[in-house]
Structures are given as C-alpha cells and as structure tokens.
C-alpha cells in the first residue's frame, strides 16, 4: 500500500506516518526498489499499534522504548509486558477519573433538567465525587 492509501485507511495524515517512522515509533517501512514506501501487512500492524497507543495517550518515548525492546528480541518480553502493564495502569487511573467526572456532570445535568421542569434549581446535596465543593457551582 502507498502512504496515501494507508493515510486514508487510518484517517491520519501522511506526515503523521512519516513522523512515526522518523521518530522510530514504528520500524522502517518496506520500500520499493525506487525507495517509495510500500506498506506491507507487518508495517500496517505497527501503524495500527502506534495509532492505538497514541489514542490511549501513550507518550511517544514509551512507544519508542517498546519498539526498541521488540527489536532486541524475545529476551525483552518481560520488559515489554511490564511496559504495557504500566500503561494499562495509567489508563485505568484515567478511566476512574473520567468516570468520576462523568458522574458529576450527570448529576448537574439532571438538576438543570429538573429546574427546567419545575422552574427552580435546587441543590439538595453535594455534587458526587466532590463533597468539598459548593453544591451551587
């Protein structure tokens, strides 16, 4: 696949694909005899991983470390597993924080919806996940 086809397939720019390769977030992409990028199935798996990890908020440095470990062979499997487990822990923490934020917003939305029906905004208890806040905020 050409870089244009890959960019269209994954809804990212060609510049992003070049950046991933330049920063060593993915291995060097296969090339034609004329040195044009020719993405193979293995290249696409790396692109998919890079997109997934970036979407999850994985720092570029971690992705670079992961690729380096992968290229160093199977002896690095424990280190790769540890790296991925650490990132999963980060995501779990972020998920917990996001859920708490969503709960707070749902509480506030419900009170505003009730106010539209009754003509009166009532804050009868603190906003969830933030018992120290002023309930009228």
Image: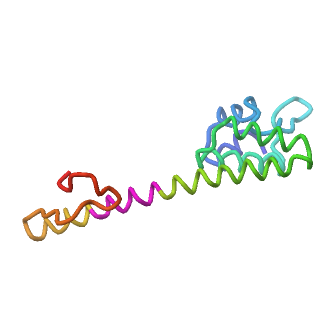
Q: How is the image coloured?
A: rainbow
Please give the name of the residue rendered at 82% of the width and 38% of the height, measured from the top-left corner: 68
- Please provide percent x and percent y for residue 107: 28, 64
Counting labels gives: 0
Furthest toward the left, the residue is 119
- Please provide percent x and percent y for residue 137: 20, 51
- Please provide percent x and percent y for residue 26: 77, 39
- Please provide percent x and percent y for residue 9: 67, 50
The span shown in magenta is 97-107
Looking at the image, is 3 positioned above or below residue 95? above
Looking at the image, is 63 positioned above or below residue 42? above
Please give the name of the residue rendered at 66% of the width and 48% of the height, measured from the top-left corner: 53
Specify whether 120 is left or right of 9.
Answer: left
Looking at the image, is 43 positioned above or below residue 25? below
Furthest toward the front, the residue is 132
Specify whether 113 is left or right of 78.
Answer: left
- For residue 135, what is the image quadrant? bottom left
Give the camera-side residue of 13 and 106.
106
Give the camera-side residue of 7 and 92.
92
Specify whether 24 is left or right of 70.
Answer: left
Please give the name of the residue rendered at 81% of the width and 47% of the height, measured from the top-left corner: 79
Magenta stretch: helix, strand or loop mostly: helix
Please give the name of the residue rendered at 63% of the width and 44% of the height, measured from the top-left corner: 58
- For residue 36, what is the image quadrant? top right
- For residue 99, what is the image quadrant? bottom left
Give the camera-side residue of 31 and 99.
99
Specify whether 114 is left or right of 64.
Answer: left
Locate the N terminus by quadrant: top right
Can residue 88 be found in the magenta stretch? no
């Amino acid at each position: 696949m050409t870089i244009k086809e890959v960019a269209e397939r994954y809804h990212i720019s060609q510049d992003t694909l070049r950046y991933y390769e330049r920063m060593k977030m993915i291995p060097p992409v296969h090339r034609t005899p004329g040195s044009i990028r020719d993405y193979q199935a293995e290249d696409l798996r790396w692109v998919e991983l890079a997109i997934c990890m970036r979407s999850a908020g994985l720092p570029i440095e971690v992705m670079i470390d992961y690729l380096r470990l992968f290229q160093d062979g199977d002896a690095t499997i424990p280190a790769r597993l540890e790296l991925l487990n650490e990132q999963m822990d980060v995501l779990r923490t972020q998920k917990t924080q996001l859920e708490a934020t969503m709960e707070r917003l749902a509480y506030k939305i419900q009170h505003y919806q009730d106010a539209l029906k009754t003509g009166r905004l009532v804050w009868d208890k603190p906003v969830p996940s933030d018992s120290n806040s002023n309930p009228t905020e």
